[in-house]
Amino acid sequence: MSRLVLKFGGTSVADAERIERAAATIKSEVDAGNEVAVVVSAMGSTTDELVDLADALLPGQIDDGEYDIVVAAGEQISAGLVARALKNIGIPARSWLSWQLPIKGVGTPARARIESIETDGITQGFERGEVAVVPGYQVLLDDGRLSTMGRGGSDTSAVALAGALNADRCDIYTDVEGVFTTDPRLVAKARKLDRITYEEMLEMASQGAKVLQTRSVALAMKLGVPLHVRSSFTGAQGTLVSDEENGLEDELVSGIAYSRDEAKITLVQVADRPGVAAGIFGPLADADVNVDMIVQNVSEDGKFTDLTFTVGRDDADRAVKVVETALNDVKYDRVEADPKVAKISVIGVGMRSHAGVAHRMFQALADKAINIQIISTSEIKVSVLIAEEYTELALRTLHTTYGLDDV
Amino acid sequence: MSRLVLKFGGTSVADAERIERAAATIKSEVDAGNEVAVVVSAMGSTTDELVDLADALLPGQIDDGEYDIVVAAGEQISAGLVARALKNIGIPARSWLSWQLPIKGVGTPARARIESIETDGITQGFERGEVAVVPGYQVLLDDGRLSTMGRGGSDTSAVALAGALNADRCDIYTDVEGVFTTDPRLVAKARKLDRITYEEMLEMASQGAKVLQTRSVALAMKLGVPLHVRSSFTGAQGTLVSDEENGLEDELVSGIAYSRDEAKITLVQVADRPGVAAGIFGPLADADVNVDMIVQNVSEDGKFTDLTFTVGRDDADRAVKVVETALNDVKYDRVEADPKVAKISVIGVGMRSHAGVAHRMFQALADKAINIQIISTSEIKVSVLIAEEYTELALRTLHTTYGLDDV
């Protein structure tokens, strides 16, 4: 007997038929003798619709405490429906809303974090053979009000619940078959990975692979909760995310991720003197602009240099304004923003102990005449910024270079 | 300064624009110096959609505790949205979910009654100039779970909250201008009533006028909460429902109600002996069939009689089966069900002290050759059953007979 948390995303509970399919999946785990807690997202596009309504009535404000009341209703509906679908096929079940368990949170409205989960209600239900169905994405704050956790919070709810329940595994049911070596929509030879480490998954998620939210992976790593990313439609084995390294497969590189969500900003011919970088990135941080890659080369003449960094594409215009203001008393030629860039990342725990991963990447791209604009590396990742139009070619080339093609 | 409870029905909060209109209405009461608590229904057809989903996944069962979780989400969404719309026009507001106040209830899931309302949160908000927005239709049960109160429960929530807050008035904003002397869709000369007593409203509501739920009127009468039924679209004065009699207007009859929701069941030539009636209506009660009018005449020969009664139209077939079983060892000729009937009721507190109201009704119908099938009377009401096809004619005729026409 295992104790499992099963998480069903919005597409997996999008209508009555899919909820029945999810219930059948849950039943098979119960029939196999497991204790099961379920975490659900809102149905299909429900959250988007509720967000739109909330925004229509108080535009641009999500931290007023009422936004949470509106959007949290989506997960509540799913939880009740999944519990009913389970009863309909003979599986005892009950929903547990965040304030009923409770799942306590801290932080500001609409952006709360889970602080603690009281699981007595669920474990007592386990003793009666009952499945617990918990709406994801919401917590009870200290002031007795509900708060949501930011988009994608349901993955994090599932991982946190798995941790609190000491679950053997957290299965993330979604609309893809698992984690792929790269985006199968762009690279036909992309291959589903059977296993991946937390760190690799973390890099994949933060580099644009949308299968799991970054914070849920980070939490799973911290809590040591093995994640199983799998399709709610095929029922097949998906990808296990855990701390075991890919020893058997012995791959240097696990996957190639990409992101077209960033824009490149370049300060051309800025005075090369101490404090300039700090003078720019301080105001950007104050303005809540997330900066990803930063590159500054040694200046040739010791007087002027080019400084380049990337920000979220939606933040580009705002970032330019912040920088121009910050450079008020600094000499510079101009600030250029370029949204037509893509970030390509090669990810793999294996590259820790192998030199040459980065070199092979640069060589492979050079062979295809793809110019590298910026390079950034971490222990298990090499990222480059290239012109957006080369995205597919770069992904396919690197996928082959590192032997990831499905043959 | 008055303390008011304003209740907005589903059509009054059906979309963002209507919610903004409701917020403007609330603002005008706040600007006039009043303390305001708002009770809201679910948006438009939301409840129907949620009920359909819940029924698809566990057909025919509403008392499982999860049905409530699903459908209560509709009012929760409205509450958050109305609070946001108020803040957007500068009115401090916050939502209070039933478990937050709490509004405690008793009874079975999906059919709970309000037991008590803790109003401290709301009255403390009043001191800060804050409008409270409360989702109707839901209560917190002793076991810590949510329950709903049956369809139309939001009217009852509003009245109960007005009682608990000692409010000066409960305004019911809806999609009609008020309570009419009869259905304006059937009688062009129908006239909006400025005032009506609780008892008259109770009879109007239970006789088919759908403006207010019967139980909310009964509760308002018990708590002495004046109700103001008015349109959320015109903002005009509506109908005040209170315990003051219509002294000034001195009308015998306030309104003519009708219902086409009933079916007539006749036991033809049943043995006229003691215990037969009890032997029929006992089993009908056990089968949860509501019987409305009952007529039995003295038999001519002392041996056989005809017994006629009415039940809800949806229950007619079931009622016939129950009766046939119950008559197992009683001699009778046959049981006939006739759904093509209408109940017409003349209602008015004034008729208490005036003879002749019933006589004028029967004469007016006779003058139009409308046959009266059954008669039933109470202190402030005379109801007759007629063939359904005469409904409009009977309403128009009686409306004129009692001087109710809008001139």
Image: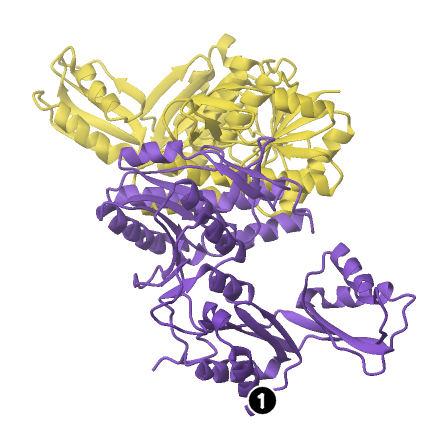
Chain colours: A yellow, B purple
Instruction: Indicate the amino acid at tag 1.
Output: Ala
Note whether residue A63 is visible: no
Note whether residue A365 is visible: yes
**Residue at 52% in and 85% down:** B393
**Residue at 38% in and 74% down:** B191
Quarter holding the N terminus of chain B? Answer: top left
Rendering coords of residue B18 (x, y %): 35, 56
**Residue at 17% in and 31% down:** A321
Q: Mark 1: which secondary structure?
A: helix
Q: Dot 1: few (<14), some (14–19), or many (≥20) neighbours within 10 Å?
A: few
Which of the two residues, B254 or A93, is positioned nearer the viewer here? B254
Which of the two residues, B365 or B289, is positioned nearer the viewer here? B365
B370 over B26 or under it: above or below: below
Please state if A152 lies on the left or on the right of A369 as rendered. right
* Residue designated by label 1: B366
Rendering coords of residue A214 (x, y %): 46, 24
A105 over B316 or under it: above or below: above
**Residue at 49% in and 18% down:** A218
Looking at the rendering, which quadrant does residue B165 occupy?
Answer: top left
Please state if B114 lies on the left or on the right of B321 as rendered. left
Quarter holding the C terminus of chain B? Answer: bottom left
Rendering coords of residue A353 (x, y %): 51, 8
B20 over A28 or under it: above or below: below
Rendering coords of residue A46 (x, y %): 48, 45
Which of the two residues, A82 or B324, is positioned nearer the viewer here? B324
Q: Mark 1 belongs to which subunit?
A: B
> Hey, which residue is sitting farthest top in the picture?
A353
